[in-house]
Image (tube, rainbow, N blue to C red):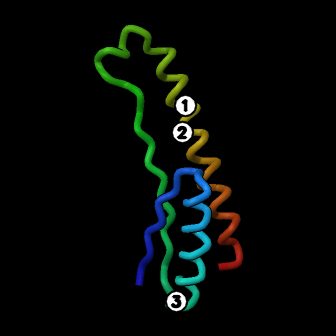
């Protein structure tokens, strides 16, 4: 059994992680935590590429932090 848990940093996502952990324990399931990032680059943004590259770096950093925090909650899983 596998469980996929998408997270976005919201309180609902935190509750979903808690529920997935409980369900995963009872089913002996593999849990995958996912965060999707939508890059802010398209043809219009190429005029100000450094600005949007910075936005994307910050978004990626936020995603990594969110996933690292979620993994801490599963350290005993």
Q: Identify whether 3 is placed above or below 37.
A: below
Secondary element at tag 2: helix
Residue found 61% across the figure and 57% down from its top: 11
Residue found 50% across the figure and 74% down from its top: 31
Q: Residues within 10 Å of mark 3 (few under 14, many from 20)?
A: few
Q: Is residue 18 left or right of residue 7?
A: right
Secondary element at tag 1: helix
Q: Is residue 9 left or right of residue 76?
A: left
Label whose residue precedes the other's in the sequence (1 or 3): 3
Quadrant occupied by the C terminus: bottom right
The answer to which of 10 and 77 lies nearer the viewer is: 10
Residue found 51% across the figure and 63% down from its top: 33
Residue found 43% across the figure and 10% down from its top: 48
**Picture coordinates of residue 24 (x, y %)?**
53, 83
User: Which disc, if any, is residue 37?
Assistant: none
Quadrant occupied by the N terminus: bottom left
Q: Residues within 10 Å of mark 1 (few under 14, many from 20)?
A: few
| Pointer 2 residue | 60
Secondary element at tag 3: loop
Q: Are marks 2 and 1 in contact (CB under 8 Å)?
A: yes
**Picture coordinates of residue 69 (x, y %)?**
67, 57
| Pointer 3 residue | 28
Q: Identify whether 44 is placed above or below 41.
A: above
Give the CA separation, mark 2 to mark 1: 5 Å
Q: Is residue 24 left or right of residue 39?
A: right
**Residue at the front extreme of this rendering:** 12
| Pointer 1 residue | 57
């Amino acid at each position: 059994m596998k469980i996929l848990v998408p997270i976005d940093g919201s309180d609902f996502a935190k509750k979903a992680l808690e529920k997935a952990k409980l369900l995963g324990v009872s089913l002996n399931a593999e849990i995958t935590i996912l965060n999707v990032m939508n890059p802010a680059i398209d043809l219009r943004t190429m005029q100000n590429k450094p600005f949007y590259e910075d936005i994307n770096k910050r978004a990626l950093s936020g995603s990594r932090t969110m996933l690292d925090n979620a993994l801490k909650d599963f350290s005993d899983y």
